[in-house]
Image: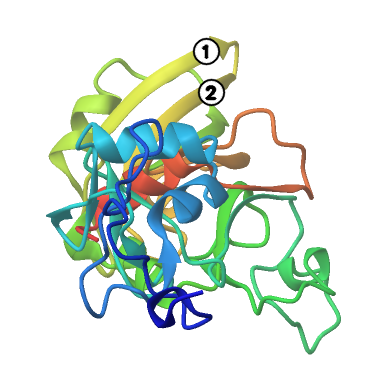
Amino acid sequence: MTRESSSRGGPRRGAAPYRPRADRPVRAREPEGDNEGVRLQKVLAQAGLGSRRACEELIAEGRVTVDGEPARLGRRVDPERQVIRVDGMRINTNPTLVYYAFNKPRGVVTTMTDPQGRPCVGDYVRGRAERLFHVGRLDQDTEGLLLLTNDGELAHRLTHPSYGVEKTYLAEVPGPVPHDLGQRLRAGVELEDGPVKVDRFRVVGSAGNRAMVEVVLHEGRKHIVRRLLEAVGHPVKRLVRLRFGAVALGDLKPGHLRPLTQQELGRLFAAVDM
């Protein structure tokens, strides 16, 4: 054996240069500093966007951005810090952040603990690893949709009046309801803490001295729906929140919660410029 072909592993003299097989494409080397984090297609798959192969196709089709820049195959990301969008919609890829819709029963206090021992929202999420808090409030006698999360930034924006996120309520009031009531509410009603007006109003149904009305507004003042309807002569007998922004109560049973979908969450992010 010659010195050149010894155990040092060098090529023999006259050997043909190595060429990769045509049926085994070579992956492009990732740029320096791009070898940390998690592969983007894995992050998307874990977020529920489909299989890794399907997520690779999303990236290849140019439908994915990372921090506003078009993504490429092989990209690694920090799912807890970077903003990832698919078709322009932000996707939650941070596994430490959770988002739930909760159907608050009537008689339950919107607090996570209650020193008076009353039933509270916190009773329904005891034992969860995350420290959840509620987005806004529903008074004790109001039932329906309440959002729970540990994302403080989103919660703050959703309740800030400057973003004008709409909430939809169904109220039972004494009937009959005059035809011009919606016009009056849209024009504005003066309350003790300032004027308030609804975004939309309609009568859902009416029978005798009972009527069901739908109220849509972006106000967040305390007891605002009850005070508003009482001011126009129709005090609320029962009040249910049906919708918060893009999230609907649907058929969620009282006392139960469910995770928000990526589409619901993406629309909430969009509503508050996140």
> Which residue is nearer to you in this view: 59 or 32?
32
Identify the residue at horizontal 33%, vertical 32% (top origin). Answer: 22
User: 52 above or below 123?
Assistant: above
> Which residue is nearer to you in this view: 56 or 177?
56
**Amino acid type at mark 2:** Met
User: 153 above or below 86?
Assistant: below
Question: Quadrant location of residue 14?
Answer: bottom left
Q: Report if residue 122 is visible in the image.
A: yes
**Amino acid type at mark 1:** Gly
Q: Residues within 10 Å of mark 2 (few under 14, many from 20)?
A: many
Residue 205 circle label: 1
> Which residue is nearer to you in this view: 159 or 81?
81
User: 59 above or below 208?
Assistant: below
Mark 1 vs mark 2, CA separation in Å = 5 Å
Q: As drawn, is 229 to the left or to the right of 174?
A: left
Residues at discs 1 and 2 in contact (Cβ within 8 Å): yes
Identify the residue at horizontal 77%, vertical 43% (top origin). Answer: 254
Kindly state the secondary structure of the residue where label 1 is placed: strand
Q: As drawn, is 218 to the left or to the right of 170?
A: left
* Mark sitting earlier along the chain (1/2): 1
Give the percent coordinates (x, y) of residue 262. 46, 43
Q: Which residue does the numbered mark 2 point to in the structure image? A: 212
Question: Quadrant location of residue 10?
Answer: bottom left
Quadrant occupied by the C terminus: bottom left
Identify the residue at horizontal 26%, vertical 62% (top origin). Answer: 29
Q: Report if residue 231 is visible in the image.
A: no
Count of numbered labels shown in the rendering: 2
Q: As drawn, is 79 to the left or to the right of 111?
A: left
Give the percent coordinates (x, y) of residue 155. 41, 68
Residue 196 circle label: none
